[in-house]
Image (cartoon, rainbow, N blue to C red):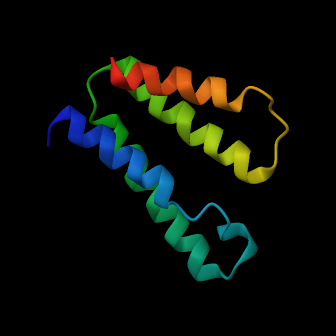
Amino acid sequence: MTQENKIQAALNMIDGYDWYWRMADDWRYDRAKVGMRKFVELVSTIENSNIRTALRNLWTLKFEETRGFKNTDITAKRNEYMAVLAA
């Protein structure tokens, strides 16, 4: 898998992750743990540390959004991380 494919797969994992698992039954919790592990494993195979960091930061940013954190610069941060991925 090329680096570009890995990046796209990681972004798809972020978008497809069940961020609201904590409001459901145990089976969603188990599935969420598996999804998180797959994301970590995939990102760890990317050689560029800046890209790894940007993807991890995007994951955290998405978590903060779903938890309702009042962060006024979410869009700016997302754009910053996406610029690292595009470089």
Q: Quadrant of residue 26?
A: bottom right
**Residue 77 horizontal side relative to residue 4, left or right:** right
Query: For the point 15% across and 37% down, which residue is it?
Result: 2
Task: Locate residue 75: give its quadrant.
Answer: top right
Out of 55 and 81, give the one closest to the viewer. Answer: 81
User: What residue lies at 26% left-to-right and 41% top-to-bottom?
Assistant: 6
Q: So how many labels did they put on this image?
A: 0
In this image, 72 relative to 22: left or right? right
Q: Is residue 53 left or right of residue 19?
A: left
As drawn, 3 above or below 81: below
Above or below, comparing residue 11 to residue 56 in the picture: below
Going by the image, does 48 lie left or right of 15? left
Relative to 21, say whether 74 is above or below.
above
Look at the image and tell me in which quarter the N terminus lies: top left
Q: Nearer the viewer, residue 52 or 33?
A: 52
The one nearer the camera, 9 or 37, is 9
* Whole-percent x, y for residue 9 in the image: 31, 49
Find residue 27 and report its horizontal and vertical position in percent: 57, 81
The structure residue drawn at horizontal position 31% and vertical position 43%, both measured from the top left corner, is 8
The residue furthest left is: 1
Q: Position of residue 21 (x, y in %)?
A: 65, 69
| Coordinates of residue 87 in the picture (x, y in percent) | 33, 17
Up-down relation of residue 10 to residue 28 (above or below): above
- Residue at x-position 58% and y-position 30%: 78
